[in-house]
Amino acid sequence: MTHHLPNAKIPAPCIINTGVVVNKLDMRRLLSDLGRVRYIYTYQGQLQSEGEGDVMEVFANPQRSTLIANHALYLNISSFDYLELKQSKEKETYFDLVQEGVCLRLIPLSTPFQERQQRCLNINDLEVMMEQVLSARWDAEFDDDNSDLL
């Protein structure tokens, strides 16, 4: 006799502003949008370190560490069992990365929209600078060509 499980499909979770995320891909997706953050690192409820920094990289590799130094955060989601989304009294979402008594709280200091806007501004600024450099180079080449005629 063969026993079959019912064909009922369980829908994927829908988490809005609060909840627990255990899927590493979902954790990575949430954290990859972070830019500047305030971090609070606690061990068994005792403050170990805190500060501000920029999230430079979010990755999953069981052989690499999560690193925070020089105002830069390199977050390895394999360093944590789960991510808990919480909200402050002001209704701002923050992230607790948790593993066996360790909690790394990340409080965003900007939104993903602000980060994208800043990146676009930086790209636009770079394009304008490149135009100016190329224009100056062409002007210099033109001047050199004209000076040969004299």
Image (cartoon, rainbow, N blue to C red):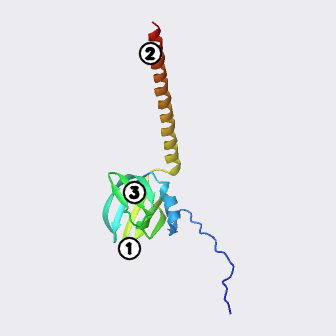
Name the residue beneath numbered marker 3. Answer: 74
Amino acid bearing label 2: Asp
Amino acid bearing label 3: Tyr
Q: How many marks?
A: 3
Counting from the top left corner in percent of width and height, residue 21 is at: 51, 68
Front disc: 2 or 1:
2
Q: Is disc 1 surrounded by few (<14), some (14 to 19) or many (20+) residues within 10 Å?
A: few
> Are circles 3 and 1 on residues that touch, CB within 8 Å?
no
Q: Work out whether mark 2 precedes mark 1 in sequence or the reverse, and give the earlier one.
A: 1
Name the residue beneath numbered marker 2. Answer: 144
Name the residue beneath numbered marker 1. Answer: 100
Counting from the top left corner in percent of width and height, residue 10 is at: 64, 74
- C-alpha span from label 3 to label 2: 49 Å
Q: Is mark 1 on a helix, strand or loop?
A: loop
- Vertical order, 120 against 6 (above or below): above
Q: Work out whether mark 3 precedes mark 2 in sequence or the reverse, and give the earlier one.
A: 3
Front disc: 3 or 1:
3
Counting from the top left corner in percent of width and height, residue 13 is at: 59, 69
Is residue 43 left or right of 148 when viewed as pictured?
A: left
Residue at far bottom of view: 1
